[in-house]
Image (cartoon, rainbow, N blue to C red):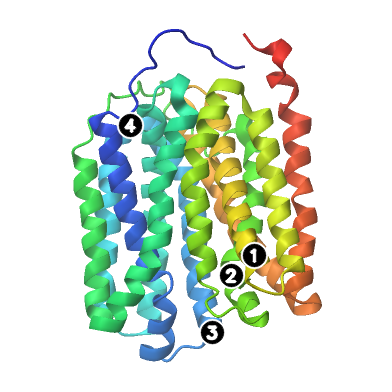
Amino acid sequence: MIIKQGGAPPQLWTKSFLLLCLSNLFIFTSFYCLLPTLPLFITDVLAGDTKVVGYIFGIFALAAVLSRPLAGHLLDTLGRKAILRLSLLLLTLAMLAYNWVTSLVLLVILRGIHGIFWGFATTASGTTATDLVPAVRRGEGIGYYGLSNTIAMAAGPLLGLEILQRFGFSILFISSFGFAALGFLCAWGIEHQAVNKSANTKSIILFEPKVFSFASIMFFVAALYSGVLSFIVLFGKEIDIENPGSYFLAFAAALFLSRPYAGKILDQQGPIKIMSIGFAALASSFLSLFFANGIVLFMMSAVLFGVGFGIIQPTALTMAINKVGALQRGVANGTMLTAFDLGVGCGAILLGMLSSSVGLSMMYLVSCFIVVIPLVIFYVNHVREYKPENSQ
């Protein structure tokens, strides 16, 4: 149901919300600094091969998936502030520990530990964000909060590669630790009004059934995202793009512009119009890749994918949070993020198998048709309740 309110809108950019966005920016920058550089550390320093790279990244994702449901439960029963601060502290210490990794075994263990703390920290941060933004501006607020991820996505990999090239792995790991430490310090200054804890703390609820349909949408969108994240550079080289990494810059720029706009439209008009635009943009981006044989359609796909992903992901998350009360936001957020992590992991494996059989171009054409699945889930489950005659 669309909420309309007269008078001035409630304040969004409070000190605590700004600090939370900065904290999220720093911890994601720390993460993205390692994303393109850790494979080089595995192959060049620890003498691993590409299969080992896949395993080590997979262990991180699996650990995050397993930790998120428990994180959501603890956030709803023990409170936000304590879990946020403790998880960010442990995440920061995990980043520091990369400086002492001297073997593949140690790296596997550390990546598992890092993944657990990452799952806790990002679930706690996202849940705190939903508490801090006013309910009538939740779509807009989550859109702005998501921009911190977007900025880190664009700047982190470039920064990590530049630090590695100039100073080596030791300074890279120290720099990543420094960014994580800044994220922890920012979070320490957040003033968060405690949410009344659940009376039944003995009952462990790890998933929120009310948001399963939104989690399904998130799963398929994340699976499609993994097809871009994992293979777009290889596809760019295949069609002779000189700098295929430019795809991510255009993608991040489109994300940056679309997220706040999507949130405002959601808050003011409901999700039907904006989600329709998002699904259309997502499908068009994969169709552009299928027909791409040069830079024009390649970059057009990046922009369209940024618009589609920038609309669907935060809108689905906001709609899910709006479905539950304050005492269920942690579990709901954990459910959504678990679906996203599972989508990325499953998508990378299945789309990778598909591309090895039919090629990358055909894989992206199939991805265009996969968009229909979350589109149908949205329309079947949620359009009726947001039709104009049901609005007030």
Disc 1 marks which amino acid? Gly
For image coordinates 28% across by 37% down, the residue present is 18
| Residue topped by disc 2 | 230
Q: Is residue 16 above or below residue 288?
A: above
The image position of residue 243, as x and y in percent, is: 52, 77
Q: Nearer the viewer, mark 3 or mark 2?
A: 2
For image coordinates 80% across by 54% down, the residue present is 369
Dividing the image into 4 quarters, which one contains the C terminus? top right
Q: Which mark is residue 50?
A: 3
Query: Quadrant of the rendered structure where residue 177 is?
Result: bottom left
Front residue of this view, candidates 46 and 173: 173
| Mark 4 vs 3: CB contact within 8 A | no
| Residue topped by disc 1 | 227
Among the two numbered marks 3 and 2 on one chain, the one whose residue lies closer to the N terminus: 3
Q: How many marks?
A: 4
The image position of residue 141, as x and y in percent, is: 42, 32
| Mark 3 vs 2: CB contact within 8 A | no
Answer yes or no: is residue 191 visible.
yes
The 10 Å Cα crowd at callout 4, few under 14, some 14 to 19, many 20 or more, is many
* Label 1: which secondary element: helix
For image coordinates 30% across by 34% down, the residue present is 17
The 10 Å Cα crowd at callout 3, few under 14, some 14 to 19, many 20 or more, is few
Disc 4 marks which amino acid? Gly
| Residue topped by disc 4 | 79
* Label 4: which secondary element: loop
The image position of residue 388, as x and y in percent, is: 70, 15
| Mark 1 vs 3: CB contact within 8 A | no
How far apart, in angstroms, are the residues tagged by discs 1 and 3? 18 Å
Among the two numbered marks 4 and 2 on one chain, the one whose residue lies closer to the N terminus: 4
How far apart, in angstroms, are the residues tagged by discs 3 and 2? 13 Å
| Mark 4 vs 2: CB contact within 8 A | no
Q: Decide if residue 56 is on the left or right side of residue 363.
A: left
